Image (cartoon, rainbow, N blue to C red):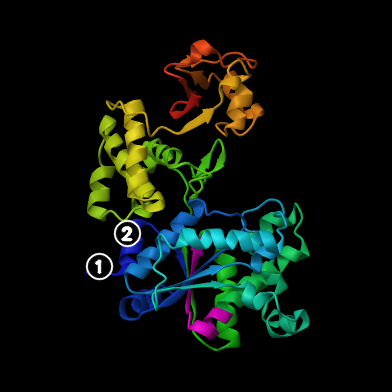
């Protein structure tokens, strides 16, 4: 039987780890309690979080106990990691709303039944801290000189790093310490951009509690050019169906570059690696079989099997031999919209995010009605555009929406 450590290595999850031999032995011989933190900066997780959830799910399936830590406290500060500017400040009400939304999403991937996993909020201990006591008990263990060498701070020093954000590392380190004391958590997992913060927590436990602790990062989801994946013309690729439709989600994975197929199958599905290798080895037009499998498997995990089948059916109807267009993303507008400005209608129905984006698409030849390119910014939706009471809108090469007029 393959150990979870070997499985994670083979799938390409593990990027950095603090004590390779000790971690490997513990994961093979013990039930390890570990945690991954998620700051509720929006009311949905996105595909960048999805890889962390998959990391967590693989560990749980191997018998280890996850703690999903929601940052009700740290979100009040904002993580400077990977950001060139300070994050937007959120209110407590916004954070609470986001936490409730994210909890529901997490339950699709992680089993939170009795003893299987924990879902906790760091606001429970961070928001009531006495700042002077915190500095005396925690701050004394941190070296400013060393903190300034951390990658998450170095890239911000030129543009300006607020003292507010400078506290973030202490708070995340303290989270690990609290989880260690309360729940016996000995390992922190997270994205590779969190390495410095994770080391800080591990060292705080070792200094303050004289206990062993470990850290392990997972690869960030990047394409073959090293750029972050999960960006669409409407912004992030969200896990919430109201923000990114299951069809749009499916199409994103269906259309990834050939060179990214193996990485995505390895990291974002539970397909056995034998099957991943088989699919990834396909060449030429046959690589589309692998992309279809990837799109279906990821959409099934995030939105459920029924939505995955609908998205697959819609995709085949538009690009394959199928003829059922009922599952193509559809919006309905009233008859009085006929004769109105097309860009206004597309913005009102959220098919495009803004008129500016619509004009950019038109300039680049990327907007069509019924496969005829739109060439004028002031193009109207006309009666003759309608076929059986509807019109098909295409954005770019493969993003379709249907507008039904009633």
Quarter occupied by the N terminus: bottom left
* Whole-percent x, y for residue 301 in the image: 37, 53
* SS for callout 1: loop
Q: Residue 10: which disc? A: 2
| Res. 246 visible in picture | yes
Can the viewer see residue 262? no
Q: Is residue 315 left or right of residue 217?
A: left
Q: Is 139 left or right of 334, judged from the image as shown?
A: right
Residue 102 placed where, x, y %?
Answer: 53, 59
Asked if the residue at tag 2 contacts the one at tag 1, i.e. Cβ–Cβ closer than 8 Å, the answer is yes
Residue 190 is covered by the magenta coloring:
yes
Residue at the image position 51 percent from the left and 51 percent from the top? 46
Vertically, is 362 above or below 352? above
Compared to residue 67, the image places residue 231 above or below, namely above
Q: Residue at x 31, y 76 (%)?
A: 28
Mark 1 to mark 2: distance in Å?
A: 10 Å
Determine crowd level at label 1: few under 14, some 14-19, many 20+ residues with C-alpha closer than 10 A: few
Q: Does the magenta portion include 213?
A: no
Q: Which residues are magenta?
A: 178-191
Q: Residue furthest top?
A: 384
Q: Position of residue 103 (x, y in %)?
A: 51, 63
Give the residue at x 28% y 43%.
280
Q: Which mark is residue 2?
A: 1
Q: Quadrant of residue 8?
A: bottom left
Residue at the limit of the structure toward the bottom, as seen here: 210
From the top left corner, tell me how far across and down residue 135 is, in percent.
74, 80
């Amino acid at each position: 039987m393959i150990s979870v450590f070997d499985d994670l290595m083979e799938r390409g999850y593990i990027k950095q780890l603090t004590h390779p031999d000790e971690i490997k032995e513990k994961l093979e011989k013990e039930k390890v309690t570990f945690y991954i933190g998620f700051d509720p900066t929006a009311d949905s997780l996105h595909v960048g979080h999805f890889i962390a959830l998959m990391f967590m799910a693989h560990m749980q399936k191997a018998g280890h106990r996850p703690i999903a830590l929601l940052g009700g406290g740290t979100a009040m500060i904002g993580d400077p990691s990977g950001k060139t500017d300070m994050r937007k400040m959120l209110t407590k009400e916004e954070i609470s709303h986001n936490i409730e939304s994210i909890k529901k999403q997490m339950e699709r991937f992680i089993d939170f039944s009795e003893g299987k996993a924990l879902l906790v909020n760091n606001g429970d201990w961070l928001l009531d801290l006495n700042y002077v006591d915190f500095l005396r008990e925690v701050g004394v263990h941190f070296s400013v000189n060393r903190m300034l060498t951390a990658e998450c701070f170095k890239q911000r020093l030129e543009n300006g790093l607020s003292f507010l954000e400078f506290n973030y590392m202490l708070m995340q380190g303290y989270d690990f310490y609290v989880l260690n004391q309360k729940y016996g958590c000995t390992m922190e997992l997270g994205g590779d951009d969190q390495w410095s913060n994770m080391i800080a927590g591990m060292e705080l436990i070792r200094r303050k509690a004289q206990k062993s602790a470990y850290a392990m990062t997972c690869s960030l989801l990047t394409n073959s050019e090293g750029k972050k994946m999960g960006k669409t013309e409407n912004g992030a690729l969200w896990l919430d169906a109201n923000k990114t439709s299951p069809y749009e989600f499916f199409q994103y994975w269906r259309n990834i570059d050939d060179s990214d197929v193996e990485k995505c199958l390895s990291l974002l599905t539970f397909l056995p690696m034998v099957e991943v290798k088989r699919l990834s080895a396909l060449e030429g037009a046959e690589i589309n079989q692998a992309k279809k499998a990837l799109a279906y498997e990821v959409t099934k995990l995030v939105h459920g099997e029924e939505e995955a089948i609908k998205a697959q059916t819609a995709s085949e109807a538009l690009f394959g031999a199928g003829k059922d267009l009922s599952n193509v993303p559809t919006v309905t507008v009233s008859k009085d919209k006929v004769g109105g400005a097309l860009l206004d209608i597309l913005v009102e129905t959220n098919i495009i995010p803004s008129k500016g984006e619509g004009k950019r698409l038109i300039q680049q030849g990327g907007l069509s009605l019924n496969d005829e390119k739109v060439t004028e910014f002031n193009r109207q939706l006309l009666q003759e555009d309608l076929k059986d009471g509807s019109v098909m809108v295409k954005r770019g090469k493969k993003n379709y929406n249907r507008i039904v007029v009633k």
